[in-house]
Amino acid sequence: MSAATISHAPATRAVWAGRILSGLVILFMLMDLSMKLTVLQPVIDTMGPLGWPTDRSTILTLGLIQLAATLLYVWPRTAVLGAILITGYLGGAVATHVRVGSPLFSHILFGVYIGVLAWGGLWLRDSRLHALLPFADARA
């Protein structure tokens, strides 16, 4: 095995790990937004107790915002903008759950978990972010 192969392998593993994390975020977002765009009854039933209007237009608007952010996240050239928009969208979910007194680890922090996965996946697959979010080895 050559030195070039050895030095390239960790970067390749990191990129693939980033793609997998990002893929999980994308799958979650697609599942959630598809339920909103089809206005499923469980979505309607959940919106009311959270303090959101249960009308079709509100649910569709949220689904379309979520779709736009997800599509931007999927495309590499706009992935950072997509991550920013997904983070904002998830921040609204966190605020909603705090306001209604939902359980901390299962509901309130769920949006934080997805946001961390989104940014972690993007950081692993896009080396340009390493300059903005430098996580260096403490021994370096």
Image (cartoon, rainbow, N blue to C red):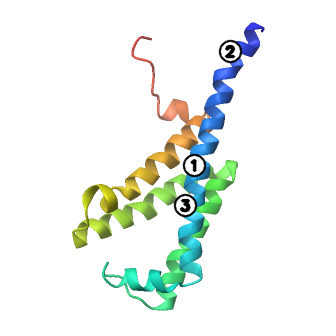
Q: CA separation, marks 3 and 2?
A: 33 Å
Specify whether 72 is left or right of 133. right
The residue lying toward the viewer, choosing from 81 and 118, is: 118
In the image, which disc is placed on residue 80? 1
Q: Amino acid at mark 1?
A: Val
Q: Position of residue 100 (x, y in %)?
A: 24, 73
Specify whether 58 is left or right of 34. left
**Which residue lies at the image location 60% right of the left edge and 67% below the top edge?**
68
Using the rendered view, name the quadrant where residue 107 is placed: bottom left
State the quadrant of the N terminus.
top right
**Residue wearing tag 3:** 28
The residue lying toward the viewer, choosing from 83 and 5, is: 5
**Residue wearing tag 2:** 7
State the quadrant of the C terminus.
top left
Image depth: mark 1 or mark 3 in front: 3
Of mark 1 and mark 3, the one earlier in the sequence is 3
The residue carrying pointer 2 sits among few (fewer than 14), some (14 to 19) or many (20 or more) residues within 10 Å by Cα, namely: few
Q: Amino acid at mark 2?
A: Ser
Q: Position of residue 138 (x, y in %)?
A: 39, 16
Whether pointer 1 and pointer 3 mark residues with C-beta atoms closer than 8 Å, the reply is no
Q: Judging from the image, what secondary structure is the residue with disc 1 in?
A: helix
Of mark 3 and mark 2, the one earlier in the sequence is 2
